[in-house]
Amino acid sequence: MPRQRSEEAGAEHAPAEPVPCRVVVCRDCCCGSRKVTGVDHDRQLTRLTEEVPVRVSDCLDVCEHANVIVVQPSAAARAAGARPVWLGLVNDRDATEDIVAWVQAGGPGIAPCPDILDLYVFTPPRRA
């Protein structure tokens, strides 16, 4: 027997929005804490959330790179082979602005990483 579609009050199911490029901001034991001095951590997080999709994470286990931000590619870029870019020691306003501009331009797999951010890129250790 064929399956019948149920439409409640004429509502149609809209397709899911594509997953955009976004950033994961580590905020736990070291990142975003007074252990990293001279940084307005609240302002950094506010600035990012004002401009780009952000997810705040507990400890990403790379404390020696505090403050850590991971730029995740959009779903389309990921399907085309783009991978997350891990940025460490993001402790100045200019780096935060460069991340915002890169994400707004499309991020990994869509827009080239600004040359200056190459100084912050690191490879996280593999997890067991």
Image (cartoon, grey):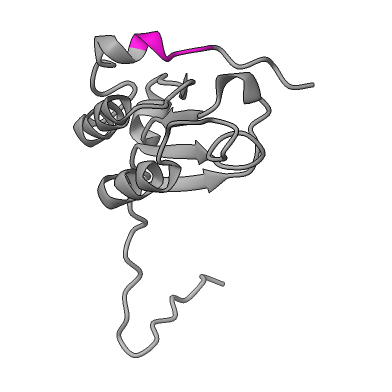
Report the number of numbered marks.
0
Q: Does the rendering let one see residue 62?
A: no
Q: In which quarter of the image is residue 33?
A: top right
Q: Considering only vertical position in the picture, is 27 above or below 95?
A: below
Horizontal side of residue 105 vs 4, given as left or right: left
Is 83 in front, or is 52?
A: 52
Q: Where is residue 54 in the image (x, y as percent from the top left)?
A: 41, 46
| Majority secondary structure in the magenta region | loop
Residue in the image at 34% along x and 90% along y: 9
Q: In which quarter of the image is residue 125?
A: top right
Q: Report if residue 120 lies within the magenta region.
A: yes
Task: Tell me the quarter of the image containing the N terminus.
Answer: bottom right
Q: Where is residue 61 in the image (x, y as percent from the top left)?
A: 68, 28
Task: Tell me the quarter of the image containing the C terminus.
Answer: top right
Q: Position of residue 57 (x, y in %)?
A: 57, 44
Outermost residue, right side: 128
Q: Considering only vertical position in the picture, is 66 above or below 53?
A: above
Residue in the image at 42% along x and 19% along y: 81
Q: Report if residue 54 lies within the magenta region.
A: no
Is 85 in front, or is 16?
A: 85
Report the span colored magenta: 118-122
Residue in the image at 46% along x and 24% along y: 84
Q: Considering only vertical position in the picture, is 21 above or below 13?
A: above
Outermost residue, bottom side: 9
Q: Does the rendering let one see residue 15?
A: yes
